[in-house]
Amino acid sequence: MMSRVARHLREGLRNVLRNGWMTFASVSAVTVTLAVLGFSLILAMNAQQMSKYVTRQVLVQAYLQPNASEQTGEQLAGQIRAMSNVGSVQVISKEEGMKQLKQDIGPQYQDILAQYKTSPLPVQLVIKAKDPNQTLQVASEVRHVQGIAQVQDGQPYVKPLFKTLNVLRDIGLVFVIALLVTSMFLISNTIRITIFSRRREIEIMKLVGAANWFIRWPFIVEGMLIGAFGAIVPLAILGYGYEVIYNRIHNLPFIMSIDLVSSGTLFIKMVVVLVGIGILLGIWGGVMSVRKFLRV
């Protein structure tokens, strides 16, 4: 068994080296295809990451009656935390709300706020749902809590936001699947051209009594090697390029708060996906391409 495996590996590697230009064409086709697929995966993973970031920022803001105390706010917060769809509740006191307001508004309005010796703002509850898609439902339940004067749930933009994110996710998934199917046929046809030049060799082996799988395995090994070699170049280019872009963009002030996929995490996922897809496509291409020539 070991000698047979060694023979298949040796023959597969020999075929790769012997068919120089055809191997180069096959590896190039795999490289280009996996490069496009890898770029699409980078966009898809970051889009998903940004989608999760955006959905985490969807909050419900509930305001108590103007004369309600912070203690009342803590009591209502405990009541809201007991709701099944609520993930967390933060109590913002009148003083904390005033401090935040001073930070948010421009300096031209600081004199107006300075006239207030005590904060005129009500106690505020910042509520986050366990599932961002349940935000509007949580807001509806909070409105029925006794002591809540006003609730802001961002309804005008929450529904369109989730709808847009779902559409983008579905489009990205369809695009990646379509690109993967296209890659399978492209790589299969390229490997088929490589095998076509050795059809006489296959026919002779078949006529002298060689089993089908004995003939197939060197071509399967060859397909695996072509797929693995074809994944190296796009991995190097996309990995290095993404790290450079990530380090430059991630430090910009307006994008620092956005949680992009780290270059290390992305590279590990890309290695698993691209090398795995390259090898699987190579195996599939080798099996499908040699099948025709085994019918002797």
Image (tube, helix red, strand yellow):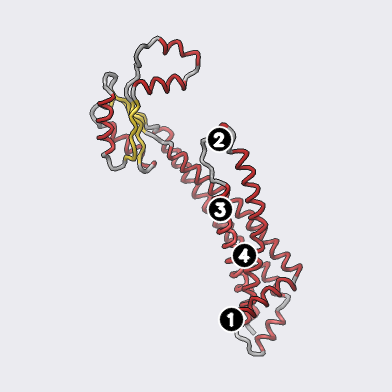
Per the image, label 2 sits on a secondary structure element best described as helix
Q: Tag 2: Cα neighbours inside 10 Å, few (<14), some, or many (≥20)? A: few
The answer for how far apart the CA atoms under marks 4 and 2 are is 40 Å
Identity of the amino acid at label 2?
Answer: Ile
Comes first in the chain, label 1 or label 2 = 1
Comes first in the chain, label 2 or label 3 = 3
The answer for how far apart the CA atoms under marks 1 and 3 are is 42 Å
Eyeballing the image, is 222 above or below 265?
below
Q: Which residue is mark 2?
A: 255
The answer for how far apart the CA atoms under marks 1 and 4 are is 33 Å
Quadrant location of the N terminus? bottom right
Marks 2 & 3, CB-CB < 8 Å contact: no
Disc number placed over residue 185 in the picture, else none: 4
Comes first in the chain, label 1 or label 4 = 1
Per the image, label 4 sits on a secondary structure element best described as helix
Comes first in the chain, label 4 or label 2 = 4
Judged left or right of residue 182, residue 51 is left
Q: Which residue is mark 3?
A: 175
**Hey, which quadrant is residue 234 in on the image?**
bottom right
For image coordinates 50% across by 42% down, the residue present is: 50
Identity of the amino acid at label 4?
Answer: Phe
Furthest residue in direction left, as rendered: 146
Q: Nearer the viewer, mark 2 or mark 3?
A: 2
Q: Tag 1: Cα neighbours inside 10 Å, few (<14), some, or many (≥20)? A: few
Q: Where is residue 73 drawn, in percent x and y?
A: 28, 27
Identity of the amino acid at label 1?
Answer: Met
Marks 3 & 4, CB-CB < 8 Å contact: no
Nearer to the camera, 18 or 1: 1
Q: How many marks?
A: 4
Furthest residue in direction right, as rendered: 21
Nearer to the camera, 45 or 288: 45
Q: Which residue is mark 1?
A: 2
